[in-house]
Structure formats: structure tokens, C-alpha cells
Amino acid sequence: MPARRSQRTAKETAARPFFTLEWTGRHVRLLDQTLLPRRVRYLSIRDEKAMFEAIRALRVRGAPAIGVAAAYGLYLGTRNRRCRTAHEVRRHAASVAVYLGRSRPTAVNLFWALDRCAAALDSLPGDTDAEAALDRLLEEARAIEREDEETCEAIGRNGAPLLRGLRGVLTHCNAGALATAGQGTALSLFYTAARRQNFTVYVDETRPLLQGARLTAWELRQAGLDVRLITDNTAGTVLQRGMAGAVVVGADRIAANGDVANKIGTMPLAIVARYYKVPFYVAAPLSTLDPATRTGRNIPIEERGAEEVTRFGGTPVAPPGTRVFSPAFDVTPARLVTAIVTEAGVLRPPYRRSFAGALRTRG
């Protein structure tokens, strides 16, 4: 395959000022989100170790984007093994998949993408050679990326009507273009709705890593939307005063009963929204649904290092030796979720039934 800097069209590049990740023809060009908003820097990812580090260190984050990144990481890691047969491709791909699966355990899209790539290899005829098997692996990764872009647009179309007439909305963390290969999940609703109406987006800063302040505020300002950044503990006041008529968040994993794992701080936001009778919407692709996980209690929750809490911008903010509890995600009970917006439509309780219908439609 000939090397090209980017395989996106000039129209696509002009329409978006940045890309979360892109396949260049030989490697993945990935936006390092740990440096935003101070610096825009792209990394060249050429093997599975670099991709593992990028996912683990949150250089790429957001469930859909992690899935796309993992698929490319699987291809890169397997390609570098210099396999001589399709059997070796499958064997090494399985080993690389196990390795990448350890990077972040909560985001189900990571495992969904790896499993999908493995299934693509398993479907090949027995006489397939190594080169064709590797081509199939890359083809599947590229398909996952393209489909994510289309999915984001569909989520925006399906969810934007929920915001009609609202003067303000509230979101937590970042579920936008920076978290996907397209225009985002939760933020896709905002981008689509903003074509027809004006409203203010209240953005939680999202401690301890400030994804809302560093990423969502930056992204929405790039798109020209009206942004108001708030501290996490201001969200209740915003809802109490009627400044936001809806809460829209993304998801990293959704259990079979509708329980939602998302960035830490989402669950108390849902509780406050219920108290003030404000709709609480989750926007996510069907690939984030995990039918094999019965309830949120069965979702593995990643814990982060203490230094993310005890230090701020490299400066200590807690006494030396302070013990820390720092889960990266919490689980919002399904009963607090008004609806889940997917590419298949707006799903409402009872979620087991609506999920089954949506998954059957997807086939």
C-alpha cells in the first residue's frame, strides 16, 4: 500500500480543524490529547506498544476512539511480527489483542473492536496467505473507523430533536470529536441542533484530569458554540436555576439492563438531574452496549494513579503520603437515564427490550 500523509479528502480536512486519529497508509497519526489546549501535537504510532501507551496515558480516549485505535494497534502489532502464513497472523493477532486489552478495562468498545478484527481473520478461507490476512485486518480497522464517523452523524440526527427549544444544556467530560473518529456522541447532538437553534452548553470541568475544561470547552469553541465552563460542583446550581434543560453525556460501557458506566462524576449528576426533573440523556453507539454484562455491578472499573489527584499541573496539592481513592468511572443506574441515543434511534426503558430490538435491527 503506498504511503500517504492522510487518506482523508480535502473537503473533510477543510470541514474539521483537527482529527483525533487518522491512517496515513503506513502508521496512525494520533492527536495527543494530554497536551490540549496548550499545544496541538500529533504522534506517529507505529506499533502496538506505542498504541498501548497512548490509550493507557489518555493520549487517545473516549470509548469509540479507543476502539478504532485498538483496531489499528492490532494491525500494526501483527504486521510487525513479519508473519509467513495466515495461521501465524491469527496467532500473533490473538497475542497482540490480549496485550492491548490490558490498556483500559472499562471501555467495552476496546474489546468489541478487537473481537471484530479477530472474527474477520477467522472468516478467511483456509488457503489465504499472510499478506492477504494482514490486508483483511487493516481493512477491518478502516471499516470500524468509517462506520464510527457515520454512527456519530446518525446519533446527532436522532438526538438533536430532544434539545429543541432549550436555552441551555449541560455535559460532563468529553464525548465529542476528540472521543471518536467522527463528530462525537453527546456533542454530536449539540453540533446538529446548533444548525437550527442557539443555546448555551454548560461544561463540567471534570476533575481530576479536566477533560471538560481542556477538551470539551476547546472543541466546542473551535466549532463556534456558546460555552460556559463550570466547576463540577456548580452543576447542581445550574440545574436548580433552570439554566440547562437537559443533561447529555457519553458512555464507556452500558450493561444489559441499561446501567451506564461513564466518567467519574456522571452518576451524581444524574441524581441531581432527577431531583430537578431535568432529562438525563446518554448518547452512545450500539457497540458500547454490552449484553454480556447483566448490570452495572458487573462492569470492571479502572482505578487511576494517586498522582492524578494529589498533584495539579505537576504541583503537589495534598500532603505527602496522602492515600487516594480514584476510580476513573462511576455507574449510573438505568432508572436515572431518561433515554439512550444511538445510531438506531432513541432507546427508552425498559432497556433490555429496547436494546434487543435495536441489536436485531443492526443484525
Image (cartoon, grey):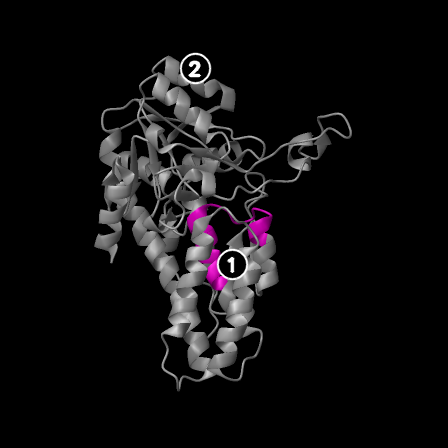
Q: Is residue 86 visible?
A: yes
Q: Main secondary structure of the magenta part?
A: helix
For marks 1 and 2, give the one nearer the viewer: 2
**Which quadrant of the structure image shows residue 266?**
top left
What residue is disc 2 on? 237
> In x, y percent, where is residue 100?
55, 59
**Which label is found at residue 345?**
none
Badge 1 crowding class, 10 Å Cα cut-off, few under 14, some 14 to 19, many 20 or more, is many
> Element at badge 1?
strand
Alpha carbon distance from label 1 to label 2: 41 Å
> In x, y percent, where is residue 363?
24, 58
Q: Is residue 293 left or right of residue 343?
A: right
Query: Does 120 lie within the magenta span?
Result: no
What residue is disc 1 on? 29
> Element at badge 2?
helix
Badge 2 crowding class, 10 Å Cα cut-off, few under 14, some 14 to 19, many 20 or more, is few
Q: Which residue is located at x 24 percent, y 31 percent?
A: 162
Mark 1 or mark 2, which has the lower sequence index? 1
Q: Amino acid at mark 2?
A: Thr
* Magenta segment: 54-72
Q: Which residue is located at x 49 percent, y 33 percent?
A: 212
Nearest the viewer among 332 and 192 is 332
Quadrant of the image for the N terminus?
bottom left
Q: Is residue 142 left or right of residue 81?
A: left
Q: Amino acid at mark 1?
A: Arg
